[in-house]
Amino acid sequence: MKNYQPYFPYSEYLKKKYGEKVYKLPVNLPVTCPNRIHGRGCTFCSELGTGFESMRSDASVKEQLTAARQKIEKKYHASKFIAYFQNYTNTFLPVSMLESCLREACKTEDIVEIAISTRPDCISEPYLQMIAELQAEYSVQVTIELGLQTVNYHTLERINRGHSLAEFIDAVMQIRNYRFDLCTHIILNLPWDDDCDAVETAKVLSSLRIEAVKVHSLYIAKNTQLCHEYENGTIAICSKEEYLHRLCLFLDYLSPETAVERLFSRIPEKDAVFCNWNCSWWKLKDELHTMMQTEGHYQGRCFHYLNGAALNKLNAVSSLKEELDRGE
């Protein structure tokens, strides 16, 4: 059971890509999010953003990478690394400032990739062209990580996301003009979503050939709009069992070629009023594996809805009829 993997893990994806284990080193830049300029941003977003494991943003890129590498290298004996520009919306920096930060990472020893976390409405040609030039100059790989959260545009409006599904699709189409990989962040248990939204999210990501997906279980950070709604009883989080079932459905419909980077959120206990039903993420992972094995779920089990699915069914029926008519 310990080695049972009913989905394509991101670690294996990196091994195939680089021939060995590769580890992310978080970098925290002095940047915010366009959605926070005139308000509090997404209803689930805290003042800290998502960079809980990052250093302070006024430290240099080189300093942050060196400090993170020392921890990872000592623990895992790693020799290849990804500079992960993680917190907030990194392409919301002026293009020249972002270029300087990315260049510093590209010049750092043993960095084989840069991963840039951003929003669909902060993707434009000048930024992509600059990143492509750095990729060619330093021979590093590039992954763009786009926060989507859900394909349900009603829910996106409800959480004050600041963009709809259309902007996500537009960003993907722009990025596809370059040799960049794409990772998408989603949350499967937003209070206004259901099983159908989980399935449709898997279908949309698969149809867009997204290379990797990072699934978050919704946590509720302190002092956020979502926290107020949760404490006031105006929203409710689905049960652990419902979330695991939703994960199973999502993976059933997800392309088997899409790497799964994460399935559960992680946040310091002191910063949240709710996270993972008071369970550790690895216990939840064990429960998910048990459920998938017991019920026969696996990634791509239902991945037969693209490339003219109705015609494929029609042709299959016709072929079967012809065989019966011939008495085969």
Image (cartoon, rainbow, N blue to C red):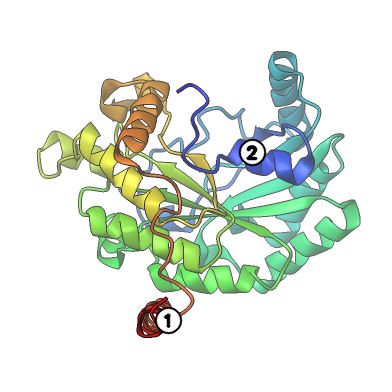
Q: Please state, as top left, top right, bottom left or bottom right, where the C terminus lies in the image.
A: bottom left
Q: Residue furthest right?
A: 137
Q: Classify 10 Å Cα crowding around label 2: few (below 14), some (14-19), many (20 and above).
A: some
Q: Is residue 40 above or below residue 27?
A: below
User: The residue tagged with tag 1: helix, strand or loop?
Assistant: helix
Depth-wise, is mark 2 or mark 1 nearer the camera? 1
Toward which corner of the image does residue 276 lie, by quadrant? top left
Question: Could one spot residue 139 in this view of the protein?
Answer: yes
User: The residue tagged with tag 2: helix, strand or loop?
Assistant: helix
225 or 261: nearer the viewer: 261
Residue that badge 2 annotates:
12
In percent of width and height, residue 236 lies at 15, 41
Toward which corner of the image does residue 131 lie, by quadrant? bottom right
Residue that badge 1 annotates:
319
Q: Classify 10 Å Cα crowding around label 1: few (below 14), some (14-19), many (20 and above).
A: few
In percent of width and height, residue 228 lies at 19, 39
Kind of residue at badge 1:
Ser
Question: Could one spot residue 274 in this view of the protein?
Answer: no
194 or 19: nearer the viewer: 19
In percent of width and height, residue 222 lies at 30, 31
Q: Give the left or right position of residue 86, taking residue 138 as reference.
A: left
Q: Is residue 223 above or below residue 67?
A: below
132 or 54: nearer the viewer: 132
Q: Residue at x 53, y 25 (%)?
A: 3
Q: Which mark is residue 253?
A: none
Q: Give the left or right position of residue 153, taking residue 109 as reference.
A: left
Q: Residue furthest front?
A: 327
Going from N to C along the chain, the mark reached first, 2 or 1, is 2
Q: Is residue 8 above or below residue 172?
A: above
Separation of marks 2 and 1 at Cα, in angstroms: 38 Å
